[in-house]
């Protein structure tokens, strides 16, 4: 297997981008990444696009060819593949690109992720997001996507004494980080009070416990590590890639307070990279709900099971904490255009490892992690990135 | 809007809580599946349909304030994950009770109710919900 490097990154602003179409944002991110890598179009061997549900959000399938076409690559006839695993679509697309380069099949691969969520109503958007859960045995019975995460939160509070305030602290931290990210959807700091006084969506979760609907795209350019210096002075290696699956329905999990797929995917990525969780300086984790970040920081090994809430409250996941978590603002504040999220995480980690994250820079960040979840944990993809 | 067969074919499980028992290991699953995740191929042909008792305890719960349009008349409603006596867990609403009286561990039993309807002239979908097994002592 060849070692793989990220040589270019690009992302759009995240938010309600009413004046931009799906294809426009997709191409915008790709163009920035290709310019960053300083490569010409004829160098691109293949394209992977992470996207959850363009078919329902904009009634457009066949996204791979669409993005390749409007990227001006139709006459090059490159392989263009759409990758879907609900919320983990972006991370999984990155893994597909990684595999293609690592295997020797392709040299230069562009991996993008995009979602256009605001062309449908909020109600419609919620229903589409719920399709990541089991439609026949969860959704139809009234289990919305927030409700499923509320079940996890309630159980976590019951079993470990996690408090409502600790959940709020996740949102407060991520909004603070978002306020330092000029591309974040929400760039205003909030307080515990903001969270605790926002309307209940599904108890105990409130509006400010939930990531928003967003439009946005992000992209990276990959190549073999031994060729990377041709394109950039600062290649970032994808040192480990892990993927795992679990039951589609939350109620079928052995333990709903543990995302087993996170543990397994992380172990696979750590083993490949030859590191442990202790080596991670900065992590982007899948905080589609505040409780999700608490599970993630436990299941990735940063904190013992049940102690994620306390660790957050103590500031251990803040920018200057033991491990900086969601420096971009996370899904909560940066925004969550579903298919783009996994790529946006990679873009943030590369930015941190290059040392170009500005006000939200983690000091001496050398190893970072991206953790992307589909559904309530039926797919998890973890990548470890490293300065070389 | 889905066609009738999509719902009709699931009626045995939705109306009567029909699951399966793996006759290789004795575990119960709901809804029916044809391969046991523990026994794998040894279970093929040995997954027998069985009507579950419909009794269990609340494993976790939430009061849903924002719901899909088809069931917006029911909100707020309590959604619970119920651990059945056979060991399988299911998701469903808990009704005919005050949300405040419910907690993790509250015993419940299954009941048949309307789940949703597809507009004024569309199909009405029925299925399982849960009620608390007995009134809490005052």
Image (tube, coloured by chain):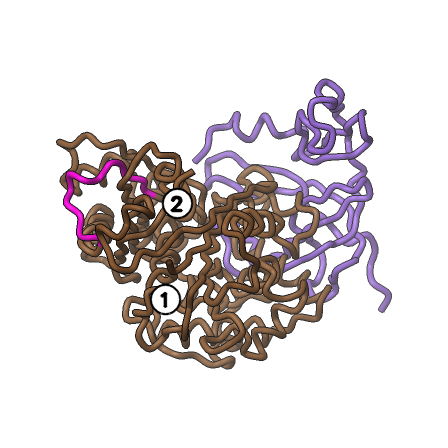
Chain colours: A brown, B purple
Q: Quadrant of residue A107?
A: top left
Label annotation for residue A3: 2
Q: Neighbour class for label 1 at 10 Å: few (<14), some, many (≥20)?
A: many
Q: Nearer the viewer, residue A150 or A267?
A: A267
* A203 on left or right of B107: left
* A338 on left or right of A46: right
| Magenta span includes A11 | no
- Residue A196 coordinates in the image, percent (x, y): 53, 76
Q: Nearer the viewer, mark 1 or mark 2?
A: 2
Q: Please report the residue visible at 17 percent of the width from the left and 43 percent of the height from the top.
A: A71
Q: Please report the residue visible at 68 percent of the width from the left and 44 percent of the height from the top.
A: B90
Chain designation of label 2: A
Q: Please report the residue visible at 70 percent of the width from the left and 20 percent of the height from the top.
A: B44
Q: Is residue B109 above or below residue A19?
A: above
CA–CA distance between discs 1 and 2? 20 Å
The residue indicated by pointer 1 is: A352
**Who comes first in sequence, dot 1 or dot 2?**
2
Q: Which residues are magenta?
A: A37-49
**In this view, which residue lies farthest toward the right?**
B137
Quadrant containing the C terminus of chain A in the rendered view: bottom left
């Amino acid at each position: 297997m060849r070692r793989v490097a990220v040589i270019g990154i690009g992302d759009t602003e995240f938010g309600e981008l009413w004046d931009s179409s799906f294809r426009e944002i997709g191409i915008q991110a790709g163009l920035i990444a290709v310019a960053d890598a300083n490569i010409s179009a004829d160098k691109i061997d293949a394209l992977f696009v992470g996207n959850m549900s363009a078919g329902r959000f904009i009634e457009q399938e066949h996204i791979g060819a669409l993005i390749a076409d409007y990227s001006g690559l139709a006459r090059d006839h490159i392989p263009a593949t759409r990758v879907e695993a609900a919320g983990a679509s972006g991370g999984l697309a990155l893994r597909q690109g990684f595999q293609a380069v690592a295997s020797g099949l392709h040299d230069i691969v562009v991996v993008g992720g995009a979602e256009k969520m605001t062309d449908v109503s909020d109600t419609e958007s919620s229903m589409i997001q719920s399709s990541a859960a089991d439609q026949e045995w969860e959704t139809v019975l009234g289990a919305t996507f927030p409700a499923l995460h509320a079940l996890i939160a309630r159980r976590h509070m019951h079993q470990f004494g996690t408090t409502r305030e600790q959940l709020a602290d996740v949102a407060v931290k991520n909004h603070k980080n978002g306020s330092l990210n000029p591309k974040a959807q929400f760039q205003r700091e909030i307080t515990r009070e903001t969270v605790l006084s926002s309307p209940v969506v599904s108890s105990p979760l409130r509006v400010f416990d939930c990531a928003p609907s967003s439009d946005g795209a992000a992209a990276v350019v990959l190549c073999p590590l031994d060729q990377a210096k041709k394109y950039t002075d600062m290649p970032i290696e994808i040192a480990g890639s892990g993927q795992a699956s679990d039951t589609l329905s939350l109620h079928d999990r052995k333990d709903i307070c543990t995302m087993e797929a996170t543990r397994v995917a992380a172990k696979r990525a750590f083993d490949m990279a030859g590191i442990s969780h202790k080596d991670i300086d900065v992590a982007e984790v899948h905080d589609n709900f505040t409780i999700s970040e608490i599970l993630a920081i436990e299941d990735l090994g940063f904190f013992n099971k049940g102690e994620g809430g306390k660790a957050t409250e103590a500031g251990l996941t803040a920018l200057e904490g033991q491990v900086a978590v969601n420096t971009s603002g996370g899904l909560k504040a940066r925004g969550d255009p579903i298919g783009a999220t996994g790529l946006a995480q990679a873009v943030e980690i590369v930015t941190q490892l290059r040392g170009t994250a500005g006000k939200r820079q983690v000091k001496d960040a050398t190893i970072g992690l991206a953790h992307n979840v589909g559904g309530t944990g039926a797919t998890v993809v973890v990548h470890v990135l490293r300065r070389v | 809007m889905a066609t009738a067969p999509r719902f009709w074919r699931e009626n045995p499980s939705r109306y009567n809580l029909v699951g399966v028992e793996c006759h290789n290991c004795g575990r119960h699953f709901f809804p029916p599946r044809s391969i046991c995740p523990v026994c794998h191929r040894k279970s093929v042909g040995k997954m027998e349909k069985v009507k579950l008792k419909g009794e269990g305890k609340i494993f976790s719960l939430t009061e849903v304030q924002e719901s899909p349009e088809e069931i917006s008349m029911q909100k707020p409603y309590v959604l619970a994950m119920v651990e059945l006596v056979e060991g399988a867990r299911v998701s469903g609403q808990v009704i005919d009770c005050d949300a405040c009286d419910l907690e993790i561990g509250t015993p419940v039993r299954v009941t048949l109710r309307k789940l949703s309807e597809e507009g004024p002239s569309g199909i009405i979908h029925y299925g399982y919900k849960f009620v608390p097994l007995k009134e809490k002592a005052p």
